[in-house]
């Protein structure tokens, strides 16, 4: 009896299949450079090919792992020698840009930064933006409901999607590539797949909303004396700049100090303040926007909300400020480094972070903890260097980050998802009834458990 590899070759063609010797040349993920393992790695070019592959894998109970840009932070694409990988790397077309409706139709393998650059040339703007823009894919962004730096103004990835095409685990194609803002015809099926981390179907194409390109962009990196000033500054900016405020990124002092050490990023001013905020405003009134921004900077300085500030004079200087926020390579060594993303009410953040830091000092006295986040939307990121090679450091670190969240009505995942890594902590955020409904959805759409098995729920 022919095996699944022979069956796929006969039905799909060998050109779709990466030579087996080349699989181990790939890394597991951005975060794990060890060799990739898989029974086969397939690189389809059409939705129909994906449909055929899944139909055959469904018939033969063959597990399938989906790869986008492979920047997952939660082991969401972990595979073994028994799994077949479907990579969307050859499905990269931007098939349509409609400036009238302000939409684009994009294949799931398209790199986010490529999409941003392409629509910008048309005078349009895709609001989704995150640090991994140069390698993450649209399909992966939607499968994980990515957040990023513009959530404060534009919302998460799901809020930018009008239509979606996906393939179910049995090969059925669900194509609902709507281009209208208002479509209230029954269940909004696209939401089943957005944020489901590839467990209910493979997203193959999407219709996303685009915005007119802003004609002004004002940016400032400011230093603040305490966390209460961080909150007061955000409140003031919302009241006086309104929806033009697109990003509000907060960095604790230890993080900025670490990434602006000699040999890393250049510190634009003193790197020993307790808190830093990088905020940005977009608009379309070049004269008034610039004037208003300067008025705001002067006012918050007079009020004592900020103690220092730097405003970039060029795009290169602006990019250098954002590099301090986005490029955290200087704190990824020595390894291991544990990365977390959580969310909770802004009013509770200062107390929560202090709680985490105190517990880490007690349980892992040699550890270092770096904190930053998209505070405007309630999102915090932690980088924990355990400072020890003991076997239980990850468990102790996880407990320190996740266990207090329930008391603050927080979530164990703000934007990275659950993957394999956070499954045991899901009940901190979701009730037993919610988890049971998730399992029901999985069992209904993927009764043979072939698609991204073990991701989110067992």
Image: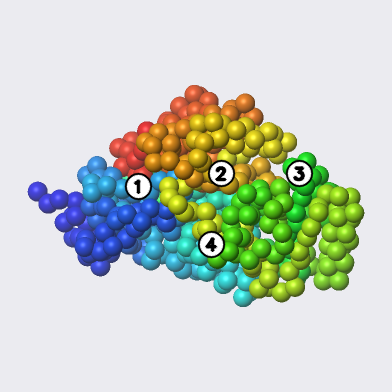
- On screen, residue 340 versus residue 378, left or right, reads left
Q: Residues within 10 Å of mark 1 (few under 14, many from 20)?
A: many
Residue at image position (56%, 60%) is 327
Residue 401 quadrant: top right
Q: Which residue is mark 3?
A: 226
Disc ID at residue 369: 2
Marks 4 and 3, the one that precedes in the sequence = 4
Give SS at disc 4.
loop
In the foreground, 370 or 16: 370
Cα–Cα gap, marks 1 and 4: 21 Å
Q: Residue furthest top?
A: 432
Cα–Cα gap, marks 4 and 3: 31 Å
Give SS at disc 1.
loop
Cα–Cα gap, marks 4 and 2: 25 Å
Cα–Cα gap, marks 2 and 3: 18 Å
Disc ID at residue 383: none
Query: Viewer-nearest of labels 4 and 3?
Result: 3
Query: Which image quadrant: the C terminus?
Result: top left
Give SS at disc 3.
loop
Q: Which residue is mark 4?
A: 133
Cα–Cα gap, marks 2 and 1: 27 Å
Residue 141 percent coordinates (x, y): 51, 54
């Amino acid at each position: 009896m022919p095996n699944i590899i022979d069956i796929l070759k006969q039905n799909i063609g060998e050109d779709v299949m990466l030579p087996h010797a080349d699989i181990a040349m790939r890394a597991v993920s951005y975060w794990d450079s060890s060799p990739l393992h898989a029974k086969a790695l397939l690189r389809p070019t059409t939705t129909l090919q994906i449909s055929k592959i899944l139909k055959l894998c469904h018939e033969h109970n063959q597990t399938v792992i989906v790869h986008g840009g492979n920047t997952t932070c939660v082991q969401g694409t972990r595979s073994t020698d028994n799994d077949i990988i479907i990579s969307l790397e050859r499905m990269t077309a931007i098939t349509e840009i409609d400036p009238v409706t302000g939409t684009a139709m994009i294949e799931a393998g398209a790199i986010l930064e490529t999409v941003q650059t392409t629509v910008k040339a048309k005078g349009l703007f895709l609001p989704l933006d995150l640090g991994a823009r140069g390698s993450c894919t649209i399909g992966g962004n939607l499968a994980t409901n990515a957040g990023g730096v513009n959530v404060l103004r534009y919302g998460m990835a799901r809020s930018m999607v009008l239509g979606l095409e996906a393939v179910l685990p049995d090969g059925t194609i669900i194509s609902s590539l709507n281009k209208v803002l208002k479509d209230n015809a029954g269940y909004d099926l696209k939401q089943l797949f957005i944020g489901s981390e590839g467990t209910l179907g493979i997203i193959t194409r999407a219709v996303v909303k685009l915005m007119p390109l802003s004609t002004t962009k004002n940016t400032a990196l400011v230093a603040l004396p305490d966390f209460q000033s961080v909150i007061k500054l955000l409140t003031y900016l919302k009241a006086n700049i309104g929806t033009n405020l697109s990003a509000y990124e907060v960095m604790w002092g230890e993080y900025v100090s670490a990434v602006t050490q000699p040999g890393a990023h250049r510190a634009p001013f003193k790197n020993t303040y307790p808190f830093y905020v990088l905020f940005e405003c977009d608009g379309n009134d070049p004269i008034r926007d610039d004037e208003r921004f300067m008025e705001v900077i002067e006012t918050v300085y007079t009020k004592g909300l900020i103690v220092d500030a730097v405003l970039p004079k060029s795009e290169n200087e602006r990019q250098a400020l954002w590099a301090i926020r986005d490029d955290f390579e200087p704190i990824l060594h020595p390894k291991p480094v544990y990365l977390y993303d959580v969310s909770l009410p802004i009013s509770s953040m200062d107390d929560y972070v202090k709680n985490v830091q105190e517990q880490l000092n007690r349980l892992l006295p040699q550890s270092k903890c770096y904190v930053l986040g998209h505070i405007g939307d309630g999102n915090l990121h932690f980088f924990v260097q355990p400072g020890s090679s003991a076997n239980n450091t990850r468990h102790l670190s996880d407990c320190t980050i996740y266990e207090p969240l329930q008391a603050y009505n927080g979530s164990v995942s703000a934007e990275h998802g659950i993957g394999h890594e956070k499954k045991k902590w899901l009940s901190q955020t979701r009730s037993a009834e919610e988890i049971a409904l998730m399992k029901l959805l999985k069992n209904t759409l993927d009764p043979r458990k072939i698609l991204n098995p073990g991701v989110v729920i067992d």
